[in-house]
Amino acid sequence: MPELAPPSAPPTGRRDRQKKREKHDVHGWVVLDKPIGMTSTHAVAVIKRLFKAKRVGHAGTLDPLASGCLPIALGEATKTVPFVMDGRKSYTFTVRWGEERDTDDAEGRVIASSEARPSAEAVRAILPQFVGTIAQVPPRYSAIKIAGERAYDMARDGEEVELQPRPVEVYRLELLEFPDPDHAVFVAECGKGTYVRSLARDIGRLLDCFGHVSALRRTWVGPFGVNDMIDLEKLEELCNRAASGEISLADALMPVATALDDIPALAVSRADAARLQRGQAVLMRGRDAPVFSGTIHVTASGQLIALAEIDRGEIVPKRVFNLAGVHGRAGRPEGV
């Protein structure tokens, strides 16, 4: 019987393509300092390519004309995205007086104009009306769905878009400076679903001078702030150093649990952790029994195990984490 020849290796080009297509289990957060002109979707695609990650998503869209804090979740961190999106957000933004635009920012066409310009005193006098729980009409060019369609798609198609007011929370709104008669710079801290573009539009209308956002920068989202942000150039440098073996890929990531800073933590034994990871509830008794109820994140030996609900001493797992692979180290990326 003739000897069989060993299977031939795939051509070099095919091996290279396979290597390029390799995806890894990478877990953690990148807090991107998104540049102006980049969409949030494009930013996610860039991060996915840099880390060769299997799963990537962002925690709150940032408009192309805006810059700043865009938290991007990789791997198991995607399970914590809702907790970040529900957190407070902070923005610094500039309003251009004298023009209202259909997009409520500099990208749109002018639909109303005025020669009037407000004083700093007049602006400060009306700001309290926009603090607290307020009724806000979102911009026509927004991602809100109307009968299953995005409002911005309908607006671009020339359809009439009528959005209803909805309650939003504005915790802080202050005038920072008046660099010239045509512009004013503000800082806002607000809750989920608040549109800064709508604030600019409504402030301009109330002052009878019209206005739109001409510059916007997000400075924090939930637990992530200015000190956590990294720009694309620095991130590419870190990923290149990791590829060469100079540093660990984890040095470019923040831990998954960073998103859960505001949620109580409960440490359990390895045996109880194993039960929770199998989706089984754990009943805590005696002095180990938690005295609170609600959502918690569970750890064992310092590692994140699960998101769970506590009810009368019983820990019921809701989301279980599998952090095998590369995951973010404690602290911020090296050199950032």
Image (spheres, rainbow, N blue to C red):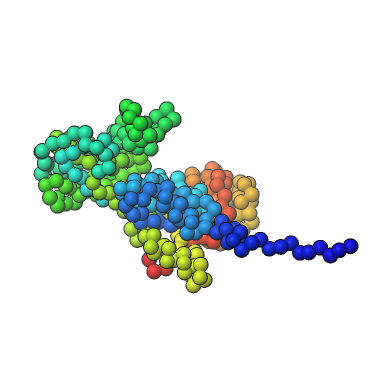
Q: Residue furthest bottom?
A: 246
Residue 87 appearing in the image: no
Quarter where residue 16 is shown: bottom right
Classify 300 as above or below 170.
below
Residue at 49 percent of width and 61 percent of height: 328
Residue at 25 percent of width and 43 percent of height: 106
Residue 172 relative to residue 73: left or right:
left
Q: Residue furthest right?
A: 1
Classify 79 as above or below 102.
below
Q: Nearer the viewer, residue 108 or 247?
A: 108
Q: Position of residue 15 (x, y in %)?
A: 61, 61
Q: Position of residue 310 (x, y in %)?
A: 53, 45
Q: Nearer the viewer, residue 131 or 85?
A: 85
How many marks on residues? 0
Residue 6 relative to residue 106: left or right:
right
Image quarter in which the C terminus is found: bottom left
Q: Position of residue 215 (x, y in %)?
A: 25, 49
Classify 238 as above or below 203.
below
Residue 149 relative to residue 226: left or right:
right
Classify 134 as above or below 258.
above
Residue at 12 percent of width and 50 percent of height: 180
Q: Position of residue 125 (x, y in %)?
A: 14, 41
Residue 229 relative to residue 303: left or right:
left
Image quarter in which the N terminus is found: bottom right
Quarter where residue 4 is shown: bottom right
Q: Nearer the viewer, residue 263 or 81?
A: 81
Residue 156 appearing in the image: yes
Residue at 39 percent of width and 48 percent of height: 40
